[in-house]
Each structure stands twice: as C-alpha cells, then as structure tokens.
Amino acid sequence: MGLKNHRGDMTSYDMSQRPRRQSPLLMPLVWGGSYIMTRRHGLKIEKQNMKGLKPPFLVFATHQGFSDYYIAPLALFPHRAIYVSDVEGFTAFGKGLYRALGCIAKRRYVPDISVIINIRRALKMGQSVVLYPESRHSNIGITAAVPDNLGKLAKSLGVPVVILSANGSYLANPFWNEEVTRKVPIRARLECICDKERLSKVTSDELQREIEKKLKYNEYEYQQQRGFRISDRDRAQGLEKALFCCRSCGKKYGMKTDGSILSCNYCKRQWELTEDGRLVSGSESISPPDWYLWQKKLIEDETKNDMPARVFPVRTEALPNEKGFVSLGNGTLQLDKEGFTLSFEGDGAKHLTFPHRIRESVQTEYNYRGRGCCIVLSTAHCCYYIYSDAPDYSPTELQYIGEWFYNRSKRGAEKS
C-alpha cells in the first residue's frame, strides 16, 4: 500500500498551524511546471474586471479535474496565493513542501473554524486565498453541490470576490478514468464579481446566488460549442462508475464498459460514447450529464419512498495526518436514514457514526491510487477511506443518498 503510515501513528493533523506564504524560490518552478502541464491543452485565460485589482482577494474556483491545480497559478500570475487543500495532499507531497506551496489543511465536508481562522490570517498577510467549493473532482462534467454559506463567508472576510472558472479540465481527465489524459482545449476565466465597494452593499444571499451562477459548468455542452472530438478508442472506459443505472431497463449495478461502449449486463442494451460526447443507442441519444441527473432522480425517488438499512462489508484505511494511511482492517458500513455507521476491527473494535444532517455531500473516489472505488467519511480528526467489493457498493449512489438526506434535513430546519 502506497503512502503507508508504517508506525500506525493516529495523531490528528494540527489544523491550527498558521499558513505560510508561497516560497518565492518555488514559484518559478510552480509557474514553469504549470505552463508545461497545460501547454498540450493550449490553455487560454481570459480576465475580466481584474485591471488594477491587487491582492488580497478571495477566489472561488471550479474543480473539474487535475488541470485545475495548474490553471490557478497561471491565472493569478504574477501574484502568489494560499490554497485550501485536503489533508491528503499533505500526505502525497509531504507536509514541508505543501506548506511551502502555501496550502491550508482541511477535511472535506467537515466544518472547522480553524480553516476560517487561517483564511483570515492569510488575507491579513496580504495573500489571496483560493478555495474549491465543490471539494472534489466532477463526477460527470457538471458542477457538484457547493456549500450554501459562500456568500456569507465572502461578506465576513471583506475582500474582493473573484471567480476562476474553467472548461476542458474534466474532459482532459474524466474522474472515472483520470489515469488517461486526452488532448482537449482548456479555457479559463478569472473574473472579479464583487469589489470592496459593492461588497458592503450586496446581501449574502445575493452574493451566494451570483457565486453559484458563476461556478456553473457543463463540460459536454462546452464540447458541443467548441466542436472538438475525442477519438480515444477507450474513451468510455470506467464510465460505469458514474453511470451505474441502465437507462433502458432501470436496473442498477449491471453496467460495464469496453472501449467506447457502455452496456448493461441485464438487458444487453449498448450505448456508444461518440467522439463528440453523446451516448447513442440506435435512434436514441443522450448526454452523460443528462443520464447522470436522470439516475440521480431515480435514486432520490427510491430513497424518499422507502429506504431500508443496508450493510456493506468493507475494508477501511484511516488518514489522520500527513504521515500516511493506517489500515483498520475489515468491518462493515451501515447506511440508514440517519447516516452512516462504520464499524471496524483493526486498532481495537470501534463504531463511528456520520449523520447525514451535518454533511452536505459524500466524497467519492472511483479508483483511489489504484486501490478501487471508495467513499471517504471524515471527522474533525481523521479521514476514513472505505472500500468494498460488494456488487451493490456504488460510491455515486451513496453520494446521492447522503445529499438527499442532508437537503431534507436542511429544508426541515428552514421550516422550523
């Protein structure tokens, strides 16, 4: 197992550590490396309302795929910035290097006041701060759920609000097959949507709506508009991880891919992912995002009508700090109307609960570091990477269910 915490050290990462400015010695490498990594995609960056704007400002960025990490430094050039990043990044690249690159640690979908404190500290240092509100790469090329407090956060920080949006990053490395990079044109836009003067006048709700609107994207619409083709013979490989329900017979967990073909093991219906990004079967044609949203509604309808508790056999790896993963052995993951309950045997028998009402989404991984599909559930002190070989263990479905229950609890709280 790569990135293994050989000593089994379960000490939690210290989230309260003060942020550091990006090392000036590293910045030429960051900018040069980012240019090299995006050159094949012909990256072009448009800037709007940025003339005369000086740091610090708050940047909300779309998060489609790996290329996003290279786009941001180039878009903000010649300025440096501080980035809010998942703890996993500190493990993969090393704590010293990641902090020198200006990263603040966070655990996904876990509220943490220390993150807000460190963002304020960074801004007081004169450093812009970049956040990726979606918190994960896009499953299917459309915007994932974002927190509903972005407007409130921006208002409280009192600095200009900037949106960094990109197109092409997902199509270059789709989340369900990130190992293969496709030559796709990438376009980015850096736009100040609220300067300090307007910030004092706009309401949090108005700003929230504007941020959400600017973060919206649809990669397949972008492909249609630009008219480019993806001719990779295996262009559909792995798509069944995102699209696990058959559009024809409606059955779950029977989808598979081979080359450019997505097919159902039950009804044998086949769909080709065409070079221009459509799923075609006979006279029928649908975009992958439309299939994904149809599938989401199907699962939501099942969930609200009657969802019995489900139990999956799992193996769990813990990520408490930057030192690597600790194997917690085999166990079970129970899903019910209240939340997830994780039980495992390693490091002493334990039971951990993750209520739906406090988690706006569920982190999905389709092939995390070659170890298979998993979901990640976190507490303030540790991230738990939960794998299963059960045929009905679909990270996408678990994400849908978790989001549905969270939204239901939020609607209930708003009515009370």
Image: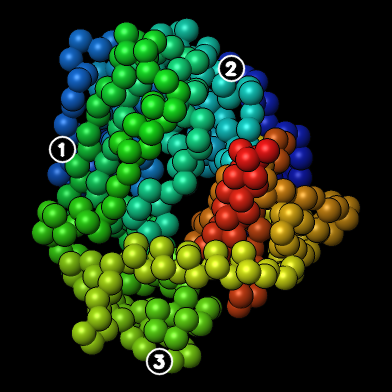
The three-letter amino acid code for the residue at tag 1 is Lys
Relative to residue 31, is residue 228 drawn left or right?
left
Residue wearing tag 3: 268
Give residue 117's mark: 2
Using a 10 Å C-alpha cutoff, classify the residue at mark 3 as few (fewer than 14 neighbours), some (14 to 19) or many (20 or more): some
Q: Earlier in the sequence, mark 2 or mark 1?
A: 1
Q: Give the CA separation, mark 3 to mark 1.
A: 43 Å
As drawn, the residue found furthest toward the right would be 348
- Seen at 65% across and 75% down, the residue is 390
Classify residue 382 by image quadrant.
top right
Relative to residue 153, is residue 406 drawn left or right?
right
- Of helix, strand and loop, which one carries label 3? loop
Residue wearing tag 1: 44
Using a 10 Å C-alpha cutoff, classify the residue at mark 1 as few (fewer than 14 neighbours), some (14 to 19) or many (20 or more): some
- Of helix, strand and loop, which one carries label 2? helix
Which of 214 and 319 lies nearest the eye of the viewer? 214
In the rendered image, the quadrant that contains the N terminus is bottom right
Classify residue 286 by image quadrant.
bottom left
Across and down, in percent, residue 266 comes to 48, 90
Q: Give the CA separation, mark 2 to mark 1.
A: 34 Å
Instruction: Classify 200 as above or below 312.
Output: above
Q: Give the CA separation, mark 3 to mark 2.
A: 54 Å
Which of 376 and 408 lies nearest the eye of the viewer? 408
Relative to residue 268, is residue 11 drawn left or right?
right
The three-letter amino acid code for the residue at tag 3 is Lys
Across and down, in percent, residue 326 comes to 71, 49
Classify residue 276 by image quadrant.
bottom left
Across and down, in percent, residue 405 comes to 63, 54
- Seen at 41% across and 68% down, the residue is 294
